[in-house]
Amino acid sequence: MLLRLAVLCTLLALTRASIAAQGQTIRHEIVRGRVIADSARPLAHANVIVTRTRDRQFRSATTDTDGMFSIDWPDGTGDYVVHVDAVGFTSVNRALRRSRTDSVLVADVRLSRAGGPQALAPVVTNAERPRPTRDPGADVAASEYTTVPQNAARRLAPDLAGDLAAIAALAPGVLPVNGGISVFGLGTAQNS
C-alpha cells in the first residue's frame, strides 16, 4: 500500500515538473463570452468551439437566447483559439490568452452578415444536334456485321407507302379499323 502511494506521488511530481518545464501551469479556467450580430443584437444558437492550443483538444457550446456561452476547462493552460459560426454569418477565429492570474477568460465576438448568395457564372454548352440514320440499310459496312431491323416504311406494301393509317397500325397497340385507327381499344372518334 505504501509502495503504491509512493509511486503515485512520484508520478504526480514528474507530471507537474514536466508541465512546469514547458512554461505552462495547469489550472481550472472558464472561457465565456457573448456573441452578437453586426446590428448589436445577441445571436442565439451560434456554434462556439474552443480549442486548447497545447494539445488541440476542443470543447464546444451553443449560445443561449442572450448570446452567452460558457465552457469549463478543469485542466486549462491559458492559451486557446475560439471559433464562432452561425447560419447566415461569416465565421470568426480569435486567439485567447490568459493574462496574469485570471481564471475566467472572456471572448466577446461580433459576427457580420454573410454577403448573400453567391452568383455563379452562366453555364454555356455547345454541341451539334445528333442526326439519326433514317435508312439503316444504307450503311453497307454496318449491315455486313450486324442485323439491323427494317424501319416502318420498309414493312409496308408498296401500294400503302403513303397511307398514314397503315403506317400508324405498325405501332404496338394500334389497329386499323373501318374509318381510321383504334389506339388501345378506343374508337376512331377518340383518336386523331
Image: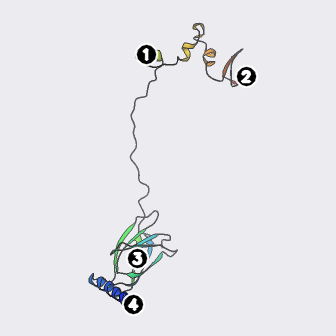
Q: Tag 2 or tag 3, which sits nearer the N-term?
A: 3
Tags 3 and 2 in contact by the CB under 8 Å rule?
Answer: no
Mark 2 residue crowding within 10 angstroms, few (<14) / some (14–19) / many (20+): few
Where 80 sits versus 28, above or below?
above
Q: Residue furthest bottom?
A: 2
Left/right placement of residue 23 relative to residue 156 reads: left
Tags 4 and 1 in contact by the CB under 8 Å rule?
Answer: no
Q: Position of residue 170 (x, y in %)?
A: 61, 18
Nearer the observer, disc 1 or disc 2?
Answer: 1
Q: Tag 4 or tag 3, which sits nearer the N-term?
A: 4
Nearer the observer, disc 2 or disc 4?
Answer: 4
Left/right placement of residue 125 relative to residue 152 reads: left
Tags 2 and 4 in contact by the CB under 8 Å rule?
Answer: no
Nearer the observer, disc 4 or disc 1?
Answer: 4
Q: Which residue is mark 4?
A: 5
- Residue type at numbered disc 1: Glu
Where 52 sits versus 187, above or below?
below
In the image, what residue occupies the spot 61% across and 21% down?
171
In the image, what residue occupies the spot 67% across and 19% down?
175
Q: CA distance from mark 2 to mark 4?
A: 101 Å
Element under disc 1: helix
Q: Position of residue 84 (x, y in %)?
A: 41, 69
Q: Which residue is mark 3?
A: 108
Task: Give the colour scheme shown.
Answer: rainbow
Q: CA distance from mark 1 to mark 2?
A: 44 Å
> Looking at the figure, which quarter contains the C terminus?
top right
Q: Which residue is mark 1?
A: 144
Q: CA distance from mark 3 to mark 2?
A: 79 Å
- Residue type at numbered disc 3: Asp
Tags 1 and 3 in contact by the CB under 8 Å rule?
Answer: no
Mark 1 residue crowding within 10 angstroms, few (<14) / some (14–19) / many (20+): few
In the image, what residue occupies the spot 60% across and 10% down?
160
